[in-house]
Image (cartoon, rainbow, N blue to C red):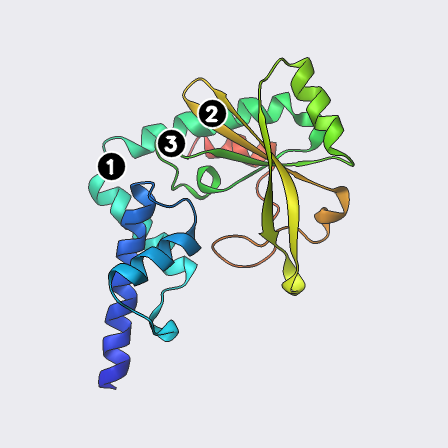
Amino acid sequence: MKIHSKCRATRLLIAHEAARILANQESWDFQGARRKAAARLGCKDQRCLPDNREIDAALHEYQLLFRSDSQPEVLRQLRRMAVEAMQQFQVFSPRLTGPVLEGTADRGSPVQLFLFADTAEELILHLMEKRIPFDQREIRMRHSGGNTKSHPIFAFQAGDAKFELILLSPVDRANPPLDSQSDKPGLGAGLSRARALLNT
């Protein structure tokens, strides 16, 4: 019981340190933040590591305590820009995902959208027609069944916001990437839900 109680306390400490790491943009994902937090606190016991939901709860708590004067407005602005971008990319059936959807986005957080197309060339042509300069790279994402797939990601800056367009194939609709919090397949939010978030 004593060991269990100590492990529970360690999970809480790591969750809050990971939240601070995410809030200060020392890491952009839960896994990286958890790894850094565990290393800083000298924890090597996997049983004492918090899951994504625990870190997310700690991040919301951190932002409420230390960023309540700025983060909500930054989030509203990013969500408004996300809706505008989704309208621009409607032909690719955009879905909002990441911290802007989850409500933890702050200054520097990217607006992440899933887009769907048969080939990357379709999106490249669209970006060129819109005269949007972009950087292209690959991102590896986990899917159900233990599969990891590489997807093209197109990054660009619009005003003060960073955008990351993650290109999925139409077949990925049936097996979308795993959600960072729940570890379950998640397609994100469509345009109507993204618009509704502006009123929350």
Residue type highlighted by circle 1: Ser
* Label annotation for residue 80: 2
Q: CA distance from mark 3 to mark 1?
A: 16 Å
Q: Earlier in the sequence, mark 3 or mark 1?
A: 1
The mark lying in front, picked from 2 and 3, is: 3
Q: CA distance from mark 2 to mark 3?
A: 15 Å
Q: Quadrant of residue 38?
A: bottom left
Rendering coords of residue 146 (x, y %)? 63, 64
Q: Is residue 7 above or below residue 101?
A: below
Q: Residue at x 34, y 74 (%)?
A: 45
* Label annotation for residue 68: 1
Q: CA distance from mark 2 to mark 1?
A: 19 Å
Q: Secondary structure at mark 1?
A: loop
Q: Residue at x 27, y 48 (%)?
A: 20
Residue type highlighted by circle 2: Arg
The reply to whether the C-beta atoms of the residues labelled 2 and 1 are less than 8 Å apart is no
Q: Earlier in the sequence, mark 2 or mark 1?
A: 1
Q: Residue at x 24, y 78 (%)?
A: 5
Badge 3 is on which residue? 108
Q: Residue furthest bottom?
A: 1
Residue type highlighted by circle 3: Gly
The mark lying in front, picked from 3 and 1, is: 3
